[in-house]
Image: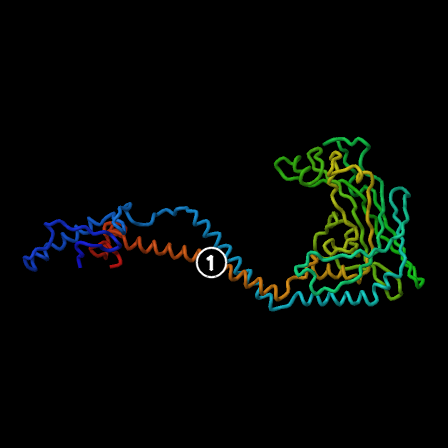
Amino acid sequence: WLKLPGTGRCGWRVGRPHAAFQPQAAGPAALARTMPFAAAAVIGSGRGAGRFGGRRPYPARLPDEPQVRGGTVVTCIATCASVALVATGLSLLVHSLTNTRGALVADYDSRVEQWEHGERGAFAAVDMDIVAHWGLGRNVTLRMEPSDAQEEFHRDTEHGKGLLPYHALTYLASVEFGTYYPGDQPPRGNQWVPLPDRSVSPHVTFEFTVRSRGGNVSAFSTPALPLVWDEIVHARTPAPDDKCSRERHGVWRNRNCHVVKRLDHVCVQVELDVNGTWVPLRKASPSVTPRSGLSASSPEVVESYGCDPKNSWNPASYSVDPCWGRPVTDRCPQAPRERHTVEVRVRSAVDPYIRAEELTDDKFDFGMSPTSQRANGIVMFLVGLCMGALPCIRLYQFHKRLRESEDCRTLKEEREERGPGGCPAGVYGNSAM
């Protein structure tokens, strides 16, 4: 059991003990007396030797301090990616059990059939005029022209699969107002004079007149809508003056960031009531922040007969003028500064476009079909399992090295760590013996 000479426990190369400690043929008593010395010689000669006889640093154990290796970062990334892919794959597989897209597409197709089989014809049999009032007695009357420009749903995941086509119909008019920019030679930088704020800015009111071919005439109007105004917004620090111009498209003046908001377009949806007249269809405003550029306390927000649910069905939509406070360049040419054009549109409440907005939360994406969900879910699940093999292998290697380190501990090290309480180790220093 002494293995002299040869290889000892943990792959240590065992040296041959000194001749003085080799057992002689002097009987059992002499053999018993020399055994402890032989064992000590075996242990001493095997210290620091590698598995194949090469020297290795002493002691042969894992360091107490964790070491950062490039493989650790890769393992962490693989673990996170594996968990995310497996979770996403399982989620897609579960959602494939319910055909959500099928229900949405069926609802939309029913609206298309209703539109094509009567509602569009009734909406086409009208003549519509608009009168814009603004300033001190200024007004303009325009005829709203029908438009059949098709609106496609390019953002649908299934590229419109299962969606019935329809013939679009809206009424359009473009109202032009005078420029709100300064003279021919606009000032630079902080020399721009701010426009009036929203409360005292110029307002416009749109009056609509709808005449049916049956003789019915209906009229309705919007409240006074601000045309263009100056608003102070927050600019991030540091260097708020630079971020005001670069991020908020405004002008830094008197330690404030001034931006200009202007009326871009107005959209109204109408329905045919029981009396055969066209009236605005008011809807319950969703509890979302309007995108019209107005605050929630603005009186204009209560109007809910617009065409965009994300805008709280507000008929007016506003945007920031990115060229205010900037010189004439290719990105900010002179032509748009010479006039302020507002597009006015009227839609039927039965328009399939509005129904698509409601069903898809204004995203125009009806979701994936169950077949696509199952295919994508299986692929993600399998890829996640394959990526999870790397952290499993690394974990196995770590425990293997830890076990080998514990097996290669010497008797002296074990006694130092265990203290005076004793060490149940064998003569080779193996605590597992």
Where residue 262 sits, quadrant-wise, is top right
Where residue 359 sits, quadrant-wise, is bottom right
Where residue 354 sits, quadrant-wise, is bottom right
Who's the residue at 37% across and 46% down the image? 65
Looking at the picture, which amino acid does disc 1 mark? Answer: Gly
Residue at the right extreme of this rendering: 215
Instruction: Decide if residue 60 is on the left or right side of residue 129.
Output: left
Q: Is residue 294 above or below residue 94?
A: above
Locate the N terminus by quadrant: bottom left
Instruction: Decide if residue 49 is on the left or right side of residue 364.
Output: left
Label 1 SS? helix
Residue 118's spot in the image, x, y percent? 84, 67
Instruction: Decide if residue 318 is on the left or right side of residue 67.
Output: right
Color theme of the render: rainbow
Locate the C terminus by quadrant: bottom left
Q: Residues within 10 Å of mark 1 (few under 14, many from 20)?
A: many
Residue 64's spot in the image, x, y percent? 34, 48
Residue at the left extreme of this rendering: 26
Instruction: Decide if residue 107 is on the left or right side of residue 21.
Output: right
Residue 395's spot in the image, x, y percent? 40, 56
Q: Is residue 261 above or below residue 378?
A: above
Along the viewing direction, whichever of 289 and 341 lies nearer the viewer: 341
| Residue receiving disc 1 | 388
Residue 403's spot in the image, x, y percent? 32, 56
**Disc count in the image?**
1
Along the viewing direction, whichever of 74 and 178 lies nearer the viewer: 74
Q: Is residue 252 above or below residue 39?
A: above
